[in-house]
Image (cartoon, coloured by chain):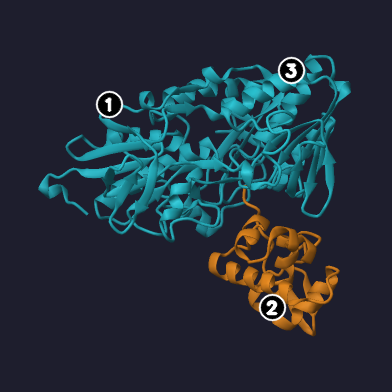
Amino acid sequence: MPEKNITGTTVEVGEDGFFLHPEQWKEEMAPELAREQGIDPVTDRHWQVIRFMRKQYLEKGEGPSVRVLGKTSGVPIKELYQLFPKGPAKTAAKLAGIPKPRGCI
Amino acid sequence: MRSKAFDVPHRIVILGAGTGGTLVANRLRRLYQRKEASITVVDQDDRHVYQPGLLFVPFGLTHPEDIVRPRHRQLGGGIDFRQVPIERLDLDGSIVHLADGTSLGYDVLVIATGSRLQPEETDGLTGAGWMERVFTFYSPEGAAALGAALARFERGRLVVNIVDLPIKCPVAPLEFCFLADWYFHERGIRDQVQISFVTPLDGAFTKPVASKALATMLAEKDIELVTEFNTGKVDGANGKLISYDDREVTFDLAVVVPLHGGASYLTSAVGLVDELGFVLTDEHTLQSEARPNVFAIGDAAGVPISKAGSVTHFEGEALVENVRRFLDGKPLDASYDGHANCFIETGFSNALLIDFSYDVEPLQGHYPSSLGLPLLKESHLNHLGKLMFQWFYWHILLPGRQVPGISSAMPRAGKKDLPAPAVEGATKQQVATVDRG
């Protein structure tokens, strides 16, 4: 599996750049991960979503969809798209260091 | 729990008389004599819709009255049917409260109330143009009204949009595109009509192999594929879908699959359902996470697989066995493996067949074995299979009869490039057999 160096730490990532092991993530990595996605600076509202993503992942083993984020993160969907223009569920998952959302069907 | 030693019958209550509720009721009725268990099924109406048939209504290939039958007639003898809306659940007291003021106590509750369309949750969807130039075919009324609009449609852009997942039968919107392509060809106006498939996914489908095959078919049929489009607003007056990131897709006629959620009475019980109203359910045993005497089946269950009749059908076997084990005070050991299959109508009297599970994505090959129907490949045989399925549904699937050669566990023989099962996956394949003598 590919590896990646973030703020001096080597982490394992999947093909799409998502973390494979959420425990390798540290808070100080988020700003660098955000810049890769064109997000700078990371605001409190970003953090609210990032922390929510990690909590959901640790509780349920899967990151939430955009619709669930809009219902439960405290940030409405419209604002989620302003915070993460390339797609809130995927981008926030990357910043939060959790694996790619499966997108069940 | 009551014990049979005292000759008091188990009280089994099933909420919902659709695919799951009906087949579970019928299977349980054969499993238990009347003195061993009472079975009560509750539904708010007496119209059982053969939902796969809805796809064909807009094209005049079937009619709403041909796909609806009375719910109570699908239930075998000795099953009590109550036609009344459900008010709320009391999980602590094991009581279902009904809208007519009565209540039902239960030893085991099976939740089978499916999913509910929520068009009102999307800004503008039920506003200007709704049922005039913006339709859904996910209800008999919507499908019939769309049929009239399609018959009037002479030229312009037809847009088929999924607002967000999960939805019932995730391939149905693609099938709608394929049939629309065929339909306009038949009418000789295909060159006057643009067809676009607009999806929140990053491809035609989620699972990679099938996604690629279906994207190729869309391209071959000259159907535009618009991906990662999260519909935020529908502007029926001006004929526009607007995404949350401000992209626009214009239309002359829109076919929108609205958001889905669980039945509304479920939210009355704390900790029973997820954010979208689907029952938090163990994906293998189908027991709810909230209470050991509550099970869920079909669309109502929040498990990571398609909301589809075939899923419900294959879940039935494990669920019935686990209900029996629970009532016997034994550990649950029947396990659903996520097996699902579906015919995908592709127009011009052809169809694809896909077959998959929690662990195995849809692959090429044949079903149920190497001599069976072709998988992930257009064929006339699959189309005939799809047409025959309605008979199978009313006469075999709902009564809960066994079909020789069709098992609930996903067959591995006949599949191409099938990865070896993981050790954990191998144990999941085991499915308990139920003696239906």
Q: CA distance from mark 3 to mark 2?
A: 56 Å
Residue corresponding to mark 3: B151
The chain letter for the residue carrying disc 1 is B
Task: Say the numbered circle drawn on residue A25.
Answer: 2
Label 1 element class: loop
Camera-nearest label, 3 or 1:
3
Residue occupying image coordinates x 16% and y 47%: B4
Q: Is residue B222 visible?
A: yes
Q: Is residue B336 visible?
A: no
The hue used for chain B is cyan
Q: Is residue B278 left or right of residue B203?
A: left
Mark 1 on the same chain as mark 2:
no
Residue furthest left as drawn: B6
Q: Position of residue B301 (x, y in %)?
A: 48, 48
Q: Quadrant of the N terminus of chain B?
A: bottom left
Residue corresponding to mark 1: B77
Camera-nearest label, 1 or 2:
1
Q: Quadrant of the C terminus of chain B?
A: top left
Category of crowding for the residue at label 3, using alpha-carbon neighbours closer than 10 angstroms: few (below 14), some (14–19), many (at least 20): some
The chain letter for the residue carrying disc 2 is A
The answer to whether the residues at label 1 and label 2 have Cβ atoms under 8 Å apart is: no
